[in-house]
Image (cartoon, rainbow, N blue to C red):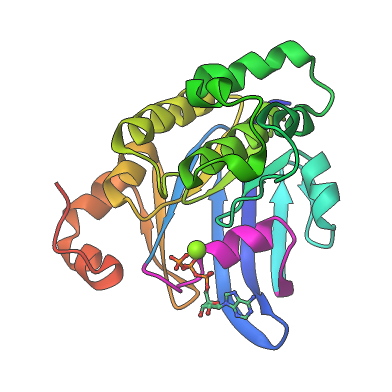
Amino acid sequence: MPATPLEVENLSAGYGPTRVLEDISFSVPSGARLAVLGRNGMGKTTLLATLAGQTKRYDGRIRIGDTDVTGMPSASRARKGLGFVPQARCVFPTLTVEENLFVGLKDRPKAALQEAYDMFPRLHERRRNLGSQLSGGEQQMLSTARSILGRPSILLLDEPLEGLAPVICEELMKAFAELAKTGDMTIVLVEQRIQSALDFADQVIVLERGRVAWAGTPQALSSDHDAVERLLGVGGLH
Ligand SMILES: Nc1ncnc2c1ncn2[C@@H]1O[C@H](COP(=O)(O)OP(=O)(O)OP(=O)(O)O)[C@@H](O)[C@H]1O
Ligand SMILES: [Mg+2]
């Protein structure tokens, strides 16, 4: 499936009676890379979960390409090409690494597994181990690799670098950039490693208390020291 654009209009959502997101709008063109930043508890995970159809939506619309997916259940959004790698990794504990990856293949041939092993050689070494026997970082790799194998046209990544060693982070960000560059995927990345996110993205939104408090290019955010300090709580970026 080729990359598709993502459009979000005046989205408000939350959990039951708890409103978390208020009036969020943005659009990501086909093949573009959006970074979603913000301090803890500001609504980043809730935004991705809402795009994936896993929260309560009060208002607004979500479009994937020409399709309005606003009222669609999660599984239908996935069939429309939406891939979601949640912050809480979901690895099947009683399946092996390879069996976990099979699940992600959908209708693709078994040979495509090699793509996952090229991206994460560690998974190849551990392919016969059970999901429950993996370290946190390995589960992270497996969860990400499984989503990518399904070739989503829009990929939502919730802190994919969390718990990974620096050298793997670098490789992974390169792999994500490659995926976006080939025009195969539109990527929305939530990340606490701000510099990595800014190096990767071509546009950024910063959430504060469930609202878009800042939107622009990574370059503009890097030079807006006031916004960086106020919204991200860090003294500066290098
Ligand atoms: N299942 C839930 N039910 C009720 N409130 C929730 C639920 N999940 C999250 N929240 C609340 O929604 C707000 C936003 O949480 P969210 O997980 O989206 O933040 P986040 O920006 O992803 O934070 P972090 O950087 O810590 O991952 C928080 O106040 C949180 O307590
Ligand atoms: Mg989160």
Query: For residue 184, what is the image quadrant?
Result: top right
Percent of width and height locating residue 77? 79, 48
Viewer-proximal residue among 170 and 138: 138
Query: For residue 46, what is the image quadrant?
Result: bottom right
Viewer-proximal residue among 203 and 209: 209
Percent of width and height locating residue 47? 58, 63
Percent of width and height locating residue 166? 30, 37
Q: Quick check: can you spot residue 53?
A: yes
**78 displayed left or right of 32:** right
Q: Is residue 57 magenta?
A: yes
Q: Which segment did they paint magenta?
A: 39-58
**224 displayed left or right of 202:** left
Seen at 50% across and 36% down, the residue is 32
Seen at 70% across and 55% down, the residue is 52
Whether residue 64 is situated above or below residue 32 in the rendered picture: below
Seen at 53% across and 43% down, the residue is 140
Seen at 57% across and 26% down, the residue is 126
